[in-house]
Image (tube, rainbow, N blue to C red):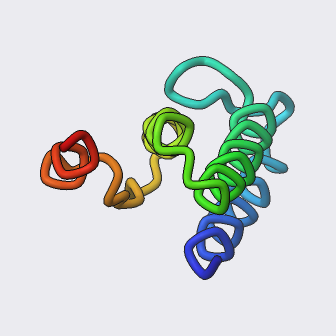
Amino acid sequence: MNQILHYRRILIFQIHDMKKFDAPIPTRSGHLISYVWAELQQSWKLYKKARLEHDLFIMKKQALKIQSLQEDLGLTKAQFPELEEKTISTVHM
């Protein structure tokens, strides 16, 4: 949760800087920051829901999407234990 608040603060500063321009600044992928931020928030919600339900497939899918969106926004990527090889191999045993 603290990580989300940290990203929200960074995004607020970025949006504040955007007010100086007539058009919104796109992210690295070309999408608008508001679109990518909404997708990031939704992915975090789905990841947390999957974690509560112990659904490893959805957790991994959302973790990869979260990292991709964070990279698109220029944020540091969150670390997920589901993406480590050691965790994945022990689950399949």
Residue 63 position in % (x across, y down): 47, 44
Q: Quadrant of the N terminus?
A: bottom right
In the picture, residue 10 is in which quadrant?
Answer: bottom right
Residue at the limit of the structure toward the bottom, as seen here: 2
Question: At x 39% / y 57%, what residue is drawn?
Answer: 76
Is 63 or 89 nearer to us in this picture?
89
Q: Quadrant of the C terminus?
A: top left
Residue at the limit of the structure toward the front, as seen here: 93
Is 10 or 46 nearer to us in this picture?
46
Question: At x 41% / y 59%, what residue is drawn?
Answer: 78
Location of residue 90 with respect to 67 vertically, above or below: below
In the picture, residue 17 is in which quadrant?
Answer: bottom right
Location of residue 28 with respect to 89 vertically, above or below: above
Location of residue 1 with respect to 62 vertically, above or below: below
Question: At x 46% / y 54%, what residue is drawn?
Answer: 75
Residue 34 position in % (x across, y down): 80, 39
Location of residue 20 with respect to 60 vertically, above or below: below
> Left or right: 52 with respect to 67?
right
Is 88 or 67 nearer to us in this picture?
88
> Left or right: 83 with respect to 8?
left
In the picture, residue 58 is in which quadrant?
Answer: top right
Residue 15 position in % (x across, y down): 76, 54
Question: At x 43% / y 37%, what residue is drawn?
Answer: 64
Residue 3 position in % (x across, y down): 56, 73
